[in-house]
Amino acid sequence: MRGGLGQGWVAALVVATLATTAARGAPDAGTAKRLRTDVDALAADIGARDVRRHPAALAKAARYVEAGLAAGTGRPVRRHTYRVEAGEVANLEVTLPGAAEPAAIVVIGAHYDTVPTTPGADDNASGVAALLELGRRLKGAKLPKTVRLVAFTNEEPPFFKTAQMGSVVYARAAAAAGDRVVAMVSLETLGYYDPRPGSQTYPPGLGLLYPDRGDYLAFVGNTGSAALVTSAVEAFRGAVDFPAESIAAPAFVTGVDFSDHWSFWQAGFPQAVMVTDTAFMRNRHYHEPTDTPERLDYARLARVVDGLEAVVRRLAGGAAPSAAGH
């Protein structure tokens, strides 16, 4: 995630949906274990992964994610490769064809690269682990709309918001192909939670509207994606008792566009949002060498994935998930 919230949060007109529920219910131990395994593989075994300083690690991470997507969904993975400077990188895509409206596409994405200074457990092995787990849960699902699970490369600086950002390459290609992307959800830093009072920070003024505990998941979009923000957070809250906040703000507000959903806005797909633990607003290890697997809360992350499964199924026109088999 590209970071740094500023005064724009306070100055801008903010359209917000504010509701919080108490986190209750035991998380599934199997889900938590699988999430930890995937985060460990990316952040502990592989570590920092970027095309300039750690190209071999980035390629190894791509192979790991590709294998995980294929095994989890039982479907082939398409590698969208392109050249960056002296190397080749790839976005990784699995398509789950829609049964009734196959031309309507829901994209669920997470970036697997890091900045060179960090092993990136929260940013963004946590998002990739959630993507892989969603793939396992959607294996064999017959949803009305097509779902694409995509692992993006080159989200982090120096490629953020450039033509070489993986999601920019992907979204532009989708637009050129005439794809009808009806919703896009970016999974961005999902695993860091701190329930202590005062653990959540904001720019001046915003804390008057939002909780001071960093124990919630945030759904973030611009004013053009407000309908998707509302639909997604409603599906999440309906599926799990886990704190959730949402905001739909003008695109110029600093921080609203700091992930891969921005690329879809630029390509003409307005219904794109980010889900996040808010990264640097609660996690002091953001982009640091200390963003390591043991700092994440896998029980909470497992509950988050439960809710995100419901989000994907709603957006794809399907029924709510069953608790069985998780």
Image (cartoon, grey):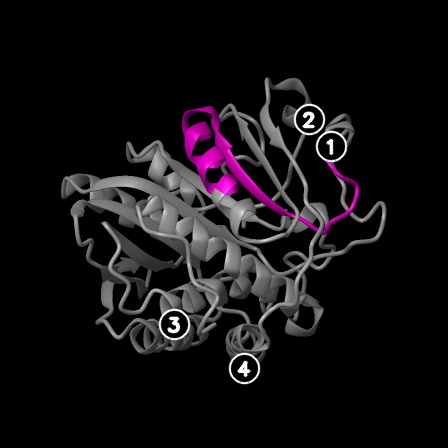
> Disc 4 marks which amino acid?
Asp
Which of pointers 2 and 4 lies earlier in the amino acid sequence?
2
Residue at 33% of width from left, 44% of height from top? Answer: 163
Look at mark 4 in the image and give the residue it sits on. 45
How crowded is the residue under tag 3: few (<14 C-alpha within 10 Å), some, or many (20+)? many
Label 1 sits on residue: 203
Q: CA distance from mark 2 to mark 4?
A: 38 Å
Q: CA distance from mark 2 to mark 3?
A: 37 Å
The x and y percentages for residue 212 are: 79, 41
Residue type at mark 1? Pro
State whether residue 148 is above or below residue 45.
above
> Label 1, label 4: how many angstroms apart (C-alpha)?
36 Å
Q: Which residue is mark 2?
A: 7
**Which disc number belongs to residue 65?**
3
Q: Tell me the element at label 3.
A: helix
Q: Does label 3 or label 4 sit earlier along the sequence? A: 4
| Image quadrant assignment for residue 25 | bottom right
The answer to whether residue 54 is visible is yes
Look at the image and give the residue range highlighted in magenta.
210-234
* Residue at (41, 42) in percent of width and height: 261
Q: Are marks 1 and 2 in contact (CB under 8 Å)?
A: yes
> Is there a contact, CB below 8 Å, between mark 1 and mark 3?
no
Q: Is residue 74 magenta?
A: no
Query: For the residue labelled by badge 2, is the local secondary structure a helix, a strand or a loop?
Result: loop
